[in-house]
Amino acid sequence: MYSITVRDHMMIAHSFRGDVFGPAQRLHGATFVVDATFRRGELDADGIVVDIGAATQELSGVLGDLNYRNLDDEPAFAGINTSTEMLARVVADRLAERVHAGALGEGARGLEAISVTLHESHVAWASYERRL
Amino acid sequence: MYSITVRDHMMIAHSFRGDVFGPAQRLHGATFVVDATFRRGELDADGIVVDIGAATQELSGVLGDLNYRNLDDEPAFAGINTSTEMLARVVADRLAERVHAGALGEGARGLEAISVTLHESHVAWASYERRL
Amino acid sequence: MYSITVRDHMMIAHSFRGDVFGPAQRLHGATFVVDATFRRGELDADGIVVDIGAATQELSGVLGDLNYRNLDDEPAFAGINTSTEMLARVVADRLAERVHAGALGEGARGLEAISVTLHESHVAWASYERRL
Amino acid sequence: MYSITVRDHMMIAHSFRGDVFGPAQRLHGATFVVDATFRRGELDADGIVVDIGAATQELSGVLGDLNYRNLDDEPAFAGINTSTEMLARVVADRLAERVHAGALGEGARGLEAISVTLHESHVAWASYERRL
Amino acid sequence: MYSITVRDHMMIAHSFRGDVFGPAQRLHGATFVVDATFRRGELDADGIVVDIGAATQELSGVLGDLNYRNLDDEPAFAGINTSTEMLARVVADRLAERVHAGALGEGARGLEAISVTLHESHVAWASYERRL
Amino acid sequence: MYSITVRDHMMIAHSFRGDVFGPAQRLHGATFVVDATFRRGELDADGIVVDIGAATQELSGVLGDLNYRNLDDEPAFAGINTSTEMLARVVADRLAERVHAGALGEGARGLEAISVTLHESHVAWASYERRL
């Protein structure tokens, strides 16, 4: 099994609902350093998983819709805790939509899975992995 | 599949028995930077894998029983080489006991697996993964 | 010249005023991974710059007053852009106050300088250095 | 499941063929920071996956055959794009040959899988995983 | 003293002349992860050293003139060993030209020094620092 | 001012004397990831600060005299707390001796300063800088 991973980041504000979150129930924020991994069993005709430049561009596009925003004000997240693991899924699902829409090229049709890791600090991170 | 990972560290002395270990048969030591990963298929009612604060606290508790010690003197490790991979299992098993005892809360009952990575330097690390 | 550095982090929300900031004029947030460095010409009687445990505790205390907050609502920052470099100074100055108040012990009276670096992402960080 | 990972690096020149590569069709180069992971279900008689020193030496041997070279001139890669993911496979396969030839010792016969990650920068890396 | 640092990278081929370089006399390559630091005594009217976005853009411009190239073919480097430390100076000098030309804005006139670090691997890097 | 830095590591046991050290008064250990930096105002005739390969070799030699040892048993450290900052000085001084003895070659006579950083964990490190 082959994979490639590209890294970018976003800087957002949000708050959580639920006693378990303690002081994180207050409005605060995070830099998420985001790693997006694309997996497949065999390389494409160019000898790659997917073009690293194209993957970087699509990840940047997905993050651009979230970056420099207060997620508490985003209709897409109404009633949802935008935890690090939940946002990992959001990024993975939006990348999957772009793969299916052909944004990563015809060769990317052979991709089998995507996993996304969001690093919220040097001591905590979360991931979500899904099939394509 | 979702996961969250938290990082902490411990500083221990130990020695190894066996020719394969060469100079590491002498009493020496290590800083282990420890990453503990918790996995599950679905998020809990709060939209998380497990509370990152609680996971950090339990990892700190497990490492606190090993930290600033000479592992050669610990009865739990009599006759055992405390290799990096063996210690990864020890930390994972002790975290699993805490999960089963409810230390990470009721929501943590949905956890499916734990993996633990111990970094012994910038160029070597070891992991152990187990079901819960 | 000797130094020791300790690392911690904080997660805050804020916004900037000024066209130069572009989309960062919106309410957003950041994780700041914070490195605090203490410098002196000679070691103290225990053979250290300052106790790493005490330095870690004081840095945690300084960051605790900022962590999980919207800095736009903090009276201390009224009318100020809480840029990464400005916050590096705030953390350095507050650590200096603690040194002068004796919070790091009598040995810490020999400290000559403090520098603080705030990492806002894997590709950008800012520092402030001052005398004690 | 246990694993150990060792890290080394190599510095090579190469070029790619195919429009998808854009400016990387020109002769350029890369530092690949290489992580080689060895996996097995149970530890050997010494309580390890495989000796970290031996693993480091064999990885260094494999990279030594590629290091400080222009891969466009290597017969082994004639007609092949030496993409990061393709080179991850080359390193993994060559390590597997060494395991099978006994270079990592008799205990290494219990190894079940190898994965190799090549970091081409701080924002992009590729992996290949195979059975032994 | 305040500073901000931004990070980017470039991937180049080159070779060295001189027995001291051993196998690096052959055509090979490197990824250089490049950190550019800008320093000044006082912040500008916006409360910053220089805009991180503008600094990132100018660093990208400087690296774009070197990226994906064989430096042995670049007239600017004829007769020069493009060592990591030499390239750190090249990048710093070209950034300084851009500052003097106003590319980082009027506020950047207050910059006092630039330092540039090129990481050639996880175990070696080089820096050059100069006044503005 | 130019510099180059090379990284290696050592794994040692030791204990501290003094109430300030708390549980670190017990026999424990550390991995020290060691960065050695060499500085000079002008490059040598080969266009370098000092050969990175030679610097790596000499750093390895210095660390080899400390690696896999219990520092409490080393006569050189009798009556001394082998704190991270103290060991940074030991490594720097021993590297300086090697420079003065010609181990880094004639070109290295132009070196002006050495600084050494020992990382004891991902959240704490210490440095010592000296003239040559």
Image (spheres, coloured by chain):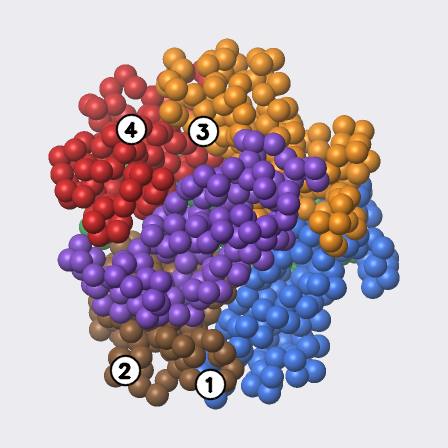
Chain colours: A red, B orange, C green, D purple, E brown, F blue
Residue A76 placement (x, y as % from top left): 21, 24
Question: Comparing marks 1 and 2, which lies closer to the viewer?
Answer: 1
The residue that mark 2 highlights is: E76
Query: Is residue E53 among what the camera can see?
Result: yes
Q: Is residue A66 left or right of residue E49?
A: left
| Discs 1, 4 touching: Cβ within 8 Å | no
| Discs 1, 2 touching: Cβ within 8 Å | no
Mark 2 is on which residue type?
Answer: Ala
Number of numbered tags placed on the structure image = 4
Q: Is residue F115 left or right of residue B6?
A: right
Residue B12 placement (x, y as % from top left): 72, 41
Q: Is residue A34 left or right of residue D63?
A: left
- Using the rendered image, report if marks 1 and 2 lie on a common chain: yes
Q: In whole angstroms, how far apart are the C-alphas of marks 2 and 4?
A: 49 Å
For mark 4, name the chain: A
The residue that mark 3 highlights is: B4
Please give the label number shown on residue E18. Answer: 1
Residue C64 placement (x, y as % from top left): 51, 35
Mark 4 is on which residue type?
Answer: Arg
Mark 3 is on which residue type?
Answer: Ile
Q: In whole angstroms, how far apart are the C-alphas of marks 1 and 2?
A: 19 Å
| Discs 3, 2 touching: Cβ within 8 Å | no
